[in-house]
Image: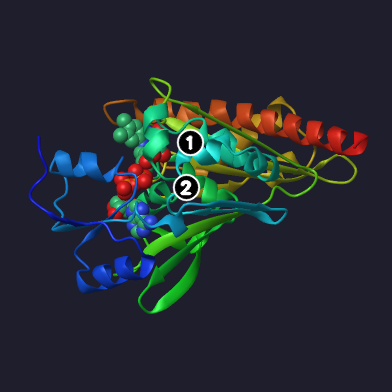
Amino acid sequence: MKPAAFTFQRPAELSEALAAYAANPGAKILAGGQSLIPLMSMRLTTVSELIDINGIGELSFIDVSEAGVRFGALARHAELHAHEEARRVQPMLHAALSHVAHATIRNRGTTVGSIVHADASGEMPVVLTLLGGTLTVASTEGRREIAADDLFIGPLETALESGEIAVEAFVPALPARHGIAFDEIARRHGDYALCGLGVVLGLAEDGGIESVRAGYLSVTETPIVVDLTDCFADGIDASSLVAAGEKALEQLEPEGDIHASAEYRAQLARTLTARVITAAHADAKARLDQEAKA
Ligand SMILES: Cc1cc2nc3c(=O)[nH]c(=O)nc-3n(C[C@H](O)[C@H](O)[C@H](O)COP(=O)(O)OP(=O)(O)OC[C@H]3O[C@@H](n4cnc5c(N)ncnc54)[C@H](O)[C@@H]3O)c2cc1C
């Protein structure tokens, strides 16, 4: 199928894009087009005007500092995935991006576009939430920063207001004595996950577990992060891992569809919770060992 007719413009400056968007709030921003164009082509959405931001060079950057990783609206999934410094400072980015779609889609799709698309089956909205990141948006009125916790307000719905373009996102660095892991189950590698999660686990100075936070995808309508720390007060073993899966499920809403039943998704959540927390614990210990040797 072909999309319905639309007008198109490709400004070279952010100020031009913002003015064009302010003049036509019914327009849509085109970034990588990997979600928007299929939706238009299948006529699941119609758009009167596309404002293509791909000509705005200032949106194409990845800046890494010891505080974290800041990336512009035109940073492609593939660029962020391959960025060694970004991986060092916040390894969750690389781990989660490894599961986003297929190489051709990662070459074009943008991580900020994925965040704004706000699909609770997508990896990067939940990663932004899990890491306590922020999204910066601009309009003709100025700029504002939105915390991930305030960003995802409904299925495929964000707190962006009319005329606002997302210009960059920021995720803080992984703190010392912390580890991460990410895993998901999809029918084929690169497909949207039937269920997946990322875990950030912190170790106390005595080696005990200080914090365990898990962000889940495809089992709620909006990105969700569950604090599972309480389950590990007496350390990590088979029973605490089972308890964590059950505790997480109290807050998840796995649903059935043509890809998987609700029961199967719930079982994936249990299995993956144990698997990913175990991996994050091993990662935290390995990083601690490395820090001690350095
Ligand atoms: C076959 C296939 C498989 C995929 N699998 C996965 C997967 O497993 N996991 C996953 O997370 N994603 C997956 N995707 C989606 C992919 O990650 C997209 O790149 C991403 O969802 C959207 O990024 P984009 O840059 O392509 O945005 P676009 O498609 O250009 O835009 C998406 C939406 O966000 C808006 N938007 C984009 N950028 C901005 C901005 N800067 N400011 C304001 N609004 C903006 C657009 O107006 C539009 O509404 C898949 C896509 C395909 C086609």
Seen from the viewer's position, the closer of residues 144 and 44 is: 144
Provide residue 49's location: percent of width, then percent of height. 17, 58
Which mark, by number, is residue 78? 1
Horizontal relation, residue 258 to residue 188: left or right: left
Provide residue 290's location: percent of width, then percent of height. 85, 33
Seen from the viewer's position, the closer of residues 179 and 167 is: 167
Horizontal relation, residue 188 to residue 24: left or right: right
Residue at 70 percent of width and 47 percent of height: 174
**Residue 255 at least partly seen:** no
How dense is the environment of label 2, judged by Cα within 10 Å: few (below 14), some, or many (20 and up)? many
SS at badge 1: helix
Provide residue 85's location: percent of width, then percent of height. 67, 42
Residue at 68 percent of width and 28 percent of height: 279
Give, as a three-letter code, the residue at label 2.
Answer: Ala
Residue at 40 percent of width and 45 percent of height: 120
Q: Quadrant of residue 280?
A: top right
Q: Is residue 146 above or below residue 282?
A: below
Horizontal relation, residue 239 to residue 217: left or right: right
Location of the C terminus by quadrant is: top right
Report the residue that reaches farthest toward the top: 188
SS at badge 2: loop
**Residue 65 at least partly seen:** yes
Which mark, by number, is residue 75? 2
Which mark, by number, is residue 272? none
Horizontal relation, residue 139 to residue 76: left or right: left
Q: Are circles 2 and 1 on residues that touch, CB within 8 Å?
A: no
Q: Is residue 248 above or below residue 190?
A: below
Q: Quadrant of residue 235?
A: top right
Provide residue 180's location: percent of width, then percent of height. 67, 37
Seen from the viewer's position, the closer of residues 74 and 201 is: 74
Q: How far apart are labels 2 and 1 at the CA level?
A: 8 Å
Give, as a three-letter code, the residue at label 1.
Answer: Ala
